[in-house]
Each structure stands twice: as C-alpha cells, then as structure tokens.
Amino acid sequence: MNAVSSAVLRYSPLLILALAWEAAARSGLISSSALPAISKIAVAWLDLARSGDLTGNTLASLWRTGAGLGLAILIGGLLGFAMAFWRGAETALSPVVELFYPLPKSALIPITALWLGFGDGSKILLICMGCMLPVTLGAFNGALSADRTLLWSARSLGASRLRSMWDVVLPSAVPELLNGIRTALALSFVLLVSSELIVSREGLGYLIGFLGSNGTYEGMFAVVLTVAFIGFLADRLYEAFVRRTLAWRE
C-alpha cells in the first residue's frame, strides 16, 4: 500500500463524519442553527476568507500561540533540568509545580487580563504559564531517566557538569521532553481560544464569539473547524518532526 492510499484509508473516518453531518443537517431532524450543513459552512468559510476577517484573526492567534508556547518551552525546559540536577531547585519548585499542575489553566484568564489587559500580552502570558508545566515535567522526568553510569563516566573522564548534561543527559531526556511539548502544543490552542472568547478584540476565539452572538452560525462553525484543522495540522507536523529528531534512536 502506497503512502497516498494509506493516508486516504487513515483519514476516511473524517470523510464519513462529514457526509453523515451533511445528511443529518439536510434531513431536517436537527435545527440548522444547532448543526448547519457542511456545504453551508464551506460557503461561509470562503466568505470569511475573501473578506480578510479569517486571515487577520488567524495570524493574530498564531502569533500569540507561537510566542506563548516558545516561552513555555524555553522556561519550562530550563526549570525541568534545574529540578533534576540541583536539589535546591527541586526543593523550591516541586511544591509549586504540584500545586498548579492540576489547576484548570483557564482559571488564569481573568488574572492575566487584570495584569496585562485585553491585548496580546495577556494571551501570551496565559499560554506560557499554562503550557510551561507539561514541558517542565517532561524535561524533569527525562533528565532523571539519564543513565547515571554514563554520566559518572563522563565526569570521571574530565567532562564538565555542563558538557555532561549536553552529551549525556540531553539525548536521554529528549523523548520525554518532546512528549511534554506535544501536550503543551495541544493545550496552547485550548487556552488561546478560551482566552480570546472572553477577553479579546481579535483572534479566532473572538471571531467565534462574535459570529455566534450575531446568529451567524455557519460562520461560527467555519471558524471552529478552522481552529480544529490548524491544531490537527500542527500536531501532524510536530509528529513528523519528532520522528525525524528521534531517528537516531532506531
């Protein structure tokens, strides 16, 4: 089976879902406001794209997501490695991580809005704070899984602490770290749309709320499906990046 056939077979449930959706909407059994037909949603999507509303709000959302997630990866990775190798850092940070990890991250929306207002800053801070913990735990667990014998051997051969971490710890920690980043990637879209629905004047979440409040349900569903597609595409691209990055382990 070639790659095209495999992809068609793998994603055929999405096509079946779309056809069932269209049939259910056209049958009249479900209100068109509750579930507009896929064909009408596609027309609404084209109208939004032609007007520029979809493009501008998508770019605003992608900027916020990228900035917040990038900061979360940088800060969370450093904190995770610090907790794994410096007892003082673990003592100081572990209670904080344990306290805030189960906290619903959307509860931070009013706090970040209070601090930084309704602009980009509050969304970036929210995504950074919410996504940092999965990355931190991934880096921490990955660093702890490093082979201590290899680490001691490197140190006995004269490698500095920093060089030992780079040559021994980091390669061992990469799989767990990448898993933590994948979790953070999915979470970033949840936090983005949630915050934009509540405290924003632009972005995909704002557009969903605006269209829904005006009764433009086809457009609202079009934007919701756009968010789903962007998240799906981001996850597929990240999965391909992970396979390429970890190819050396096979």
Image (tube, rainbow, N blue to C red):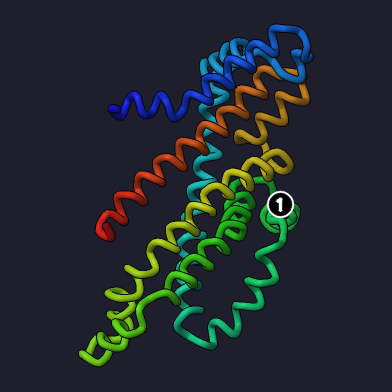
x 55%, y 19%: residue:
16
User: 59 above or below 155?
Assistant: above
x 52%, y 15%: residue:
50
The spot of residue 162 in percent (x, y) is 32, 81
| Residue 240 in sight | yes
Image quadrant containing the C terminus: bottom left
Residue 61: quarter of image: top right
User: 186 above or below 90?
Assistant: above
> Across the whole image, how many numbered discs are drawn on residues?
1
Judge by depth and name the residue closer to the eye, 207 or 114: 207
Judge by depth and name the residue closer to the eye, 207 or 104: 104
The spot of residue 110 in percent (x, y) is 75, 53
Disc 1 marks a residue whose amino acid type is Ser
| Residue 68 in sight | no
- The residue where tag 1 is placed is 106
Residue 217: quarter of image: top right
Image quadrant containing the N terminus: top left
Residue 85 as seen in the image, left or right of residue 151? right
x 50%, y 73%: residue:
79
Judge by depth and name the residue closer to the eye, 143 or 6: 6
User: 127 above or below 196?
Assistant: below
| SS assignment at label 1 | helix
Residue 198 as seen in the image, left or right of residue 1? right
Outermost residue toward the top?
27
Judge by depth and name the residue closer to the eye, 250 or 62: 250
